[in-house]
Image (cartoon, rainbow, N blue to C red):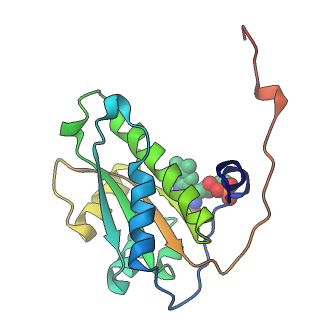
Amino acid sequence: MDALQAILTRRSIRQYQPDRPIAPETVEMLLRAAMAAPSARNLRPWEYLVVEDRQVLDSLSRVHPHGRMLAQAPLAIVLCADPGRQPLEGYWLQDLSAATQNLLLAAHALGLGAVWLGVQPRPEREAALREVLGVPDPIRIGMVVAIGHPAESKEPVDRYDPHRVHRERW
Ligand SMILES: Cc1cc2nc3c(=O)[nH]c(=O)nc-3n(C[C@H](O)[C@H](O)[C@H](O)COP(=O)(O)O)c2cc1C
């Protein structure tokens, strides 16, 4: 699958085949794709928390208000940042967002299904995840990606809207 095809056909997948773990080399490839993302001043403030333990995944599914699919997913990658490594105020979340999109596209290109679970800007979500995962201060939690072998398929959606495009001046 080439890059454009991956971009144009990716969908959020929230149902996964039970008892099918993700191979370790695939997990590494997903992380490699995430870490290939651009970041402000190339400072790469990210830290990745890989969660495959069933009990921890179940706990995550309970504390994230829209994360029910984590109870089925064999893998979650929690994208964290050390703000001390990204002194440009507000940039760490943008850095993590670029990494997240890379991760989603890589998962799709590898035949996996994945969905982005928002954490920011919701302090209560971050606090609950911090507690479950033992993430220390001052490390920040940006988002969670649930990943698995897909048990649903979704048609691509063309969202191109020429009315949202402005040329030269608004
Ligand atoms: C910042 C952000 C937060 C999101 N949070 C959630 C979430 O908590 N739970 C969920 O099921 N999907 C979440 N999504 C996925 C969106 O619902 C999804 O991308 C959107 O409906 C478009 O569908 P598609 O990804 O299939 O194209 C989130 C996406 C983004 C970018």
Quadrant where the C terminus lies?
top right
Residue for point 40% across, 57% down: 32
Q: Quadrant of residue 15?
A: bottom right
Query: Is 129 on the left or on the right of 3, as rendered?
Result: left
In the image, 127: left or right of 16? left
Ligand 1 shown in quarter: bottom right
**In the image as oriented, which residue stretches furthest toward the top?**
169
Out of 82 and 41, give the one closest to the viewer.
Answer: 41
Evaluate whether residue 103 shows in this view. yes
Q: Is 12 located above or below residue 112 in the figure?
A: above
Image location (x, y in percent) of residue 161: 81, 35
Q: Position of residue 151 (x, y in %)?
A: 66, 81
Give the residue drawn at x 31%, y 59%: 48
Residue 128 pos. (x, y %): 31, 63
Q: Residue at x 34, y 85 (%)?
A: 55
**Res 157 quadrant in image:** bottom right
- The part of the image, by quadrant, that contains residue 111 is bottom right
Residue 5 locus on image (x, y percent): 72, 53
Q: Can residue 68 be seen in this snapshot?
A: no
Going 51% across and 88% down the picture, which residue do you hit? Answer: 20
Residue found at the very far bottom of the displayed protein: 19
